[in-house]
Image (cartoon, coloured by chain):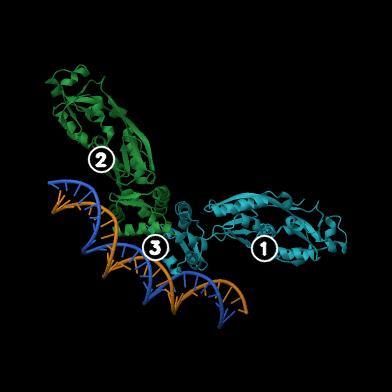
Chain colours: A cyan, B green, C blue, D orange
DNA sequence: AGTTGATTGTGTATTTTTGCACAATGGTTG
DNA sequence: CAACCATTGTGCAAAAATACACAATCAACT
């Protein structure tokens, strides 16, 4: 009979793809991971991984094993919480991965309120362009532009939000007036760095404003925002960032509007961990009850 | 974090109640079981067993842990079957526990037909008075007088069956005639050994025939049957044993009739093991499609 | 093409786990 | 009540699993 504990090495290696990464997360030596996997394969009498130069890749048998091992993991986590009364992730921290603008401009401004309610919970906010993986356990909670592909994730809609075209009042005062979309051709724009965008959802600029004359690009939303404030040109900006800034003015609100949706994603194993649940509720309340902030007035 | 494999020691010890028994089934030393349980308790930070002189008894925490660990075990067994293509119980044997009469007189006479269909499956028939425990894995399949109390068992009704009062023609010819229940008082009877009957379901003799004059008792149904055949007296006998025996004759068929039901019980983990499934189907077919045999003509 | 950095694999020392022999306990039976 | 049986617990040697140091490999970049 095989060793049940070896399934943990299997799960971690299937997620990390590399012996060293898996070993680091399991706090063991990489040779141990290698040997446990070998032992498991021998006991089950199947090859679970293809060892290519790119790392360990699940075989067909490994793919069949994965959901079964995950179910065992889910039960085990539940068991550990219920019996030992301990939460699976150590410490009192909850890692939340969000799109950069939302995290840095909205959530970061409300964590103080949350902390006063839950002084024992520490929030790690990962507000980056690169997508965090919940199934690889890089984050506990994620806010995403779309529902999850698959996996053992629970997801619900947080809110709709809107981007509009904004410019500094100074810029508008010193440039030709804009009465319709056709007037945009002669203006300067701020946008993303195309190459660096991992998420196709962010590429709406090109779809919204054709053949724009872009004079400044950045991966960083705050940098774009400050550049627009500085009067370098027009830019598509989240309403929740721009509408309370008196130095900015909306341009062509009737014609130009990008509406999107934020989704909250949480791993099903963590759904009922009190700490994670508290953060989920906080985020749902914060973003779900503020349509004027998210959609603009 | 605790060691998943320790759950196996926990499960086996909870079933066997004794370190030595659990160790024997796990093919390890009893000290290993003891140490693994201690380690598990330390990691989960709860006591799982009370160590009384009578053995290891589950605590409240242990009782809470049990169903969770069992779910993990179920998944693990499924995993082992699906991935390794191996059945949980080694070899090609299926152990069937049945009431003595049914096993020795009916099933034993039809195993040859089953074997010709499934030459690779070996049936171990445990036809004894003492009840086998499926949850302790003493048998793979059981036929019982009642639905299971609880546990991870799947059960369905196999058939109704009947017992009638029989006597040897020789006996009836040499003793006073029996025209009604009141005539039974002067006759001799064959019955069970009261003290040794574990199963209250078998105690129907006393309920059916009051104040019978019992002259021979045995725990063994065949012994009873042969004693009746030998003309020692009257006895309650399963119709499936007696009705094809020309030397026996039914007594008071209108007045005396005990009807009961056989249930098939199988552990849910084994339900979908091909080998076990084949035996379940065989038993269901054999006993379900023979009402004339089981109930008498 | 050479260098760097990350990865996997191999041999060996160390640590941990396990099995065995034996002691201790506690209930049962003649 | 003593002898017996089954059980649990303890110390120590054997076995197994693990970490460590180092070699080999391969992709990426200068």
User: How many marks can you see?
Assistant: 3
**Comparing labels 1 and 2, the label whose residue is closer to the camera:** 2
The label number, if any, that marks residue A197 in the structure image: 1
Give the SS element for disc 2.
Answer: loop
Give the SS element for disc 1.
Answer: loop
Residue located 85% across and 63% down the image: A170
Q: Chain of mark 3?
A: A
Q: Nearer the viewer, residue B159 or D12?
A: D12
Q: Chain of mark 1?
A: A
Q: Nearer the viewer, residue B129 or A273?
A: A273
Mark with earlier residue (3, 1):
3
Q: Nearer the viewer, residue B32 or B163?
A: B32
Other-residue count near label 3 (Cα within 10 Å), few / some / many at <14 / 14–19 / ≥20: some
The residue identified by callout 3 is A39
Circles 1 and 2: CB atoms closer than 8 Å = no
Left of C19 or right of it: where is B212?
left
Residue located 39% across and 63% down the image: A39
Left of A55 or right of it: where is B8?
left
Q: Are marks 2 and 3 on the same chain?
A: no
Q: Is residue A116 visible?
A: yes
Quadrant of the frame with the N terminus of chain B: bottom left
Q: Are marks 3 and 1 on the same chain?
A: yes
**Comparing labels 2 and 3, the label whose residue is closer to the camera:** 2
Distance from disc 1 to disc 2, alpha carbons, whole Å, reads 71 Å
Q: Are marks 1 and 2 on the same chain?
A: no
The residue identified by callout 2 is B130
Other-residue count near label 1 (Cα within 10 Å), few / some / many at <14 / 14–19 / ≥20: some
> Which quarter of the figure has residue A221?
bottom right
Give the SS element for disc 3.
Answer: helix
């Amino acid at each position: 009979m095989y060793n049940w504990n070896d399934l943990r090495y299997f799960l971690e290696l299937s997620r990390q793809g590399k012996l060293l990464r898996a070993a680091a997360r399991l706090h063991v030596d990489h040779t141990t991971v290698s040997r446990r996997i070998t032992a498991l394969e021998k006991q089950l009498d199947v090859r679970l991984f293809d060892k290519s130069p790119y790392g360990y890749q699940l075989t067909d048998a490994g793919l069949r094993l994965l959901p079964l091992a995950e179910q065992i993991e889910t039960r085990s986590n539940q068991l550990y919480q219920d019996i030992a009364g301990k939460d699976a992730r150590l410490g009192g921290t909850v890692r939340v991965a969000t799109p950069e603008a939302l995290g840095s401009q909205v959530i970061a401004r409300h964590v103080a309120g949350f902390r006063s309610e839950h002084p024992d919970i520490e929030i790690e906010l990962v507000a980056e362009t690169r997508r965090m993986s919940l199934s690889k356990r890089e984050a506990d909670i994620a806010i995403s532009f779309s529902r999850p592909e698959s996996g053992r994730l629970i997801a619900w809609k947080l809110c709709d939000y809107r981007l509009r075209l904004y410019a500094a009042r100074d810029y508008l005062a010193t440039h030709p007036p804009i009465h319709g979309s056709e007037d945009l051709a002669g203006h300067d724009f701020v946008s993303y760095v195309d190459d660096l965008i991992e998420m196709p959802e962010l590429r709406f600029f090109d779809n919204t404003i054709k053949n724009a004359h872009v004079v400044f690009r950045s991966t960083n939303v705050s940098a774009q925002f400050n550049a627009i404030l500085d009067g370098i040109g027009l830019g598509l900006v989240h309403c929740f960032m721009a509408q309370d800034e008196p130095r900015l003015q909306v341009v062509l609100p009737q014609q130009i509007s990008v509406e999107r949706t934020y989704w909250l994603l949480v791993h099903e194993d963590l759904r009922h961990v009190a700490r994670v649940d508290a953060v989920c509720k906080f985020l749902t309340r914060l973003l779900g009850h503020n349509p004027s902030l998210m959609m603009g007035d």
